[in-house]
Image (cartoon, rainbow, N blue to C red):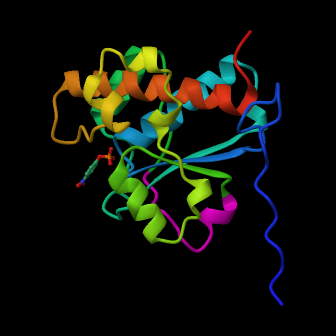
Amino acid sequence: MTAPRSPSPQPEPGRPPLAHVRRVMFVCLGNICRSPLAQGVFEHLAVARDVRDDLIIASCGTGHWHVGDPPDHRSIAVARAHGVHLRSRGRQLDASCDFTAFDLLVPMDRSNLRNLLAAGCPKDRARLLLEFAPPAALAEHPEAARTLEVPDPYHGTPADFERVYRLVHAGAEGLLDAIVGPSA
Ligand code: 4NP
């Protein structure tokens, strides 16, 4: 006999839609450009809202090339320019434990999302970061508004990293709102 599946937590009026989420893993391909930035910005926002100690926040890549590496110097620079310190080291997704160790996996683009699902991530645990960005914040980024993808800046310019920062910030703020409720 198969055990009945426990129902997903349902949104209740007045309760943030992701109120059950405490452990968040940001995911990209290399874990040196976008997801370390998302991790750092999300940590920074959580500190500012005084909820940092309530959350476990991490990032990883689906690829293995940068395990142990610091974030890309261009991500470090754009984060620093906005007062955000990046402290992660490259880590590869571990399909043997990450889908239970984290309540929510947050890929930067649809390729990362496909990789997660192919590795066995339950569909209801994976959400694109930009699903959480308020539409107004995406107004100046028509391509991202259409695709809900944070573009890979690895072969890009400093301006591409600034664009990635803005997108990541918009998504991270919306995600934190969805978990702990909007700031007063
Ligand atoms: P990320 O960018 O996925 O945002 O960290 C990349 C970093 C490295 C590579 C690709 C994308 N790479 O091919 O090494």
The residue lying toward the viewer, choosing from 32 and 151, is 151
**In the displayed structure, would residue 53 be above or below residue 100?**
above
Q: Residue at x 45, y 20 (%)?
A: 135
Q: Quadrant of residue 70?
A: top left
Q: Residue 147: where, in percent of width, then height?
A: 32, 38
Furthest residue in direction bottom, as rendered = 1
Q: Main secondary structure of the magenta part?
A: loop
Q: Residue at x 51, y 32 (%)?
A: 40
Question: Is residue 56 in the magenta section?
Answer: no
- Is any atom of residue 98 visible in this view? yes
Range of magenta residues: 90-101
Q: How many numbered discs sit on the rendered protein?
A: 0
In this image, 158 relative to 148: left or right?
left
Q: Residue 116: where, in percent of width, then height?
A: 46, 62
**In the displayed structure, would residue 158 be above or below residue 122?**
above
Q: Quadrant of residue 102?
A: bottom right
The residue lying toward the viewer, choosing from 65 and 27, is 27
Q: Residue 104: where, in percent of width, then height?
A: 62, 50
- Is any atom of residue 68 visible in this view? no
Q: Residue 180: where, in percent of width, then height?
A: 74, 28
The residue lying toward the viewer, choosing from 166 and 67, is 166
Q: Residue at x 44, y 40 (%)?
A: 36
Tell me the quarter of the image containing the N terminus.
Answer: bottom right
